[in-house]
Image: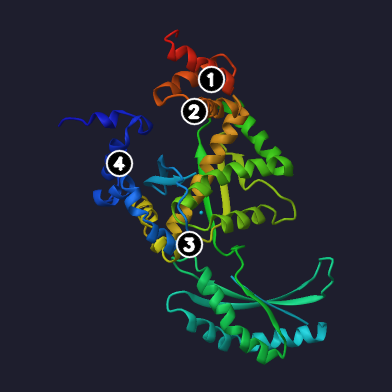
Amino acid sequence: MQRNNNSLKKFYELDLDERLDYIQNETKIKKKDLQLLKDLPKNFSFNKINNMVENAIGIIPIPLGIATNFVINGKKYLIPVSIEEPSVIAAASKKERERVKKIITDNKEELLKIANLSSRTVVAKDIQVREILDESINNMGYMIIIELIVDTKDAMGANVINTMCESIAPKIEKLSNGEVVLKILSNYSVNRLARCKATFPKEMIGGSEGVNRILLAYAFAYSDTFRAVTHNKGIMNGIDALAIATGQDFRALEASIHAYAARDGKYRSLTKWYKSKDGDLIGEIEIPMAIGIIGGIISVHPIVKVVLKILDIKNVKELASIFAAIGLAQNFAAIRALANEGIQKGHMKLHARNIALTAGAEENQVNIIAERLIKEKNVSVSKAKEIIELLNSNKI
């Protein structure tokens, strides 16, 4: 059997047609689905865009790439990436608060029944009641929070949850003789956690010394908020890219995940790194993950549909595990680079290419100029223009 020469190339070395052929061969996706990626103008007519958002005037294309070499729970994935329980609040006094909490608890089943009239698939499972004290400058006193615990299945569930909150509000007001002020979901989805754990042999990261350097870098991020912010931003680079590619609400994910990083009262690293008994490096991540694979933009955006087909996932839990894995992988790559040669080595290669383009380089000149900028340790637009002039005059 003749071996395909493309299989000998790395993914980034392939042209567009070869990359799409590779994706088709490695996944169950059909060629007609991949054709959507080549026919972008046709798939984004103004009428289609105008139906996605209000007051549309066009689109801002975001590059869609593939993260390769992922094996999660024994399954190989090509991961597309792009560089996009609810509370009802009322106010009340201590005695009154206890009375209202008892009323809500006693009428839980009836309230759940009303909530579940809003959907045949998403299910309100429980109601929890708690109280909070206003800590703002307005001193509004105590508030009672009535939380619906909802199983959203394979949907993100935002719209249905908000509808459920609104549907039970009149009944709560009638039962309590109080006023329901806000009827809105919370994006802080601590009942929807995704986890990932991976072991990295010490031999691949510079032996025991490399492991120890990474552990020191992690200790810094865990203990210092200034470092933790940048540490976690790197994790979100991977998570946001996948979120946009799969049509998720990445702003909600950002808010929820960063809040989770501060759950013990101090903002810390989202990942945990430690040694195994054999001295290998073990990494773990745990993050709230309110995502979906049905509903919303996912059901209407043609490229998002293609992305989910490339991922070949069966349910939202599988997608959540991929999110956790890419976040952990992104953190490992960054923390490993930082603890060794530094982050700038990789960043500078990309930055030099951008500088070359900014200076007006032709496509066939970009790599030549970028390499020379790095070699001369002068990554600037003025230097890039100087090299362009030399190239155009055939002096180099």
Q: Where residue 337 appears, x then y in whole percent?
A: 57, 30
**Does the CB distance between marks 4 and 3 fall below 8 Å?**
no
Q: Residues within 10 Å of mark 4 (few under 14, many from 20)?
A: some
Instruction: Identify the mark nearer the N-term, 1 or 4.
Output: 4
Seen as rendered, the residue at the extreme top is: 395
Quadrant where the N terminus sits is top left
Q: Secondary structure at mark 4?
A: helix
Picture quadrant of residue 275: top right
Q: Name which residue type carries label 2.
A: Leu
Q: Secondary structure at mark 3?
A: loop
**4 vs 3, front mark:** 3
Q: Is residue 214 above or below residue 27?
A: above
Q: Name which residue type carries label 1.
A: Ala
Q: Secondary structure at mark 2?
A: helix
CA separation in Å, label 3 and label 1: 40 Å
Please give the label number shown on residue 20: 4
Residue at image coords 29%, 43%:
26
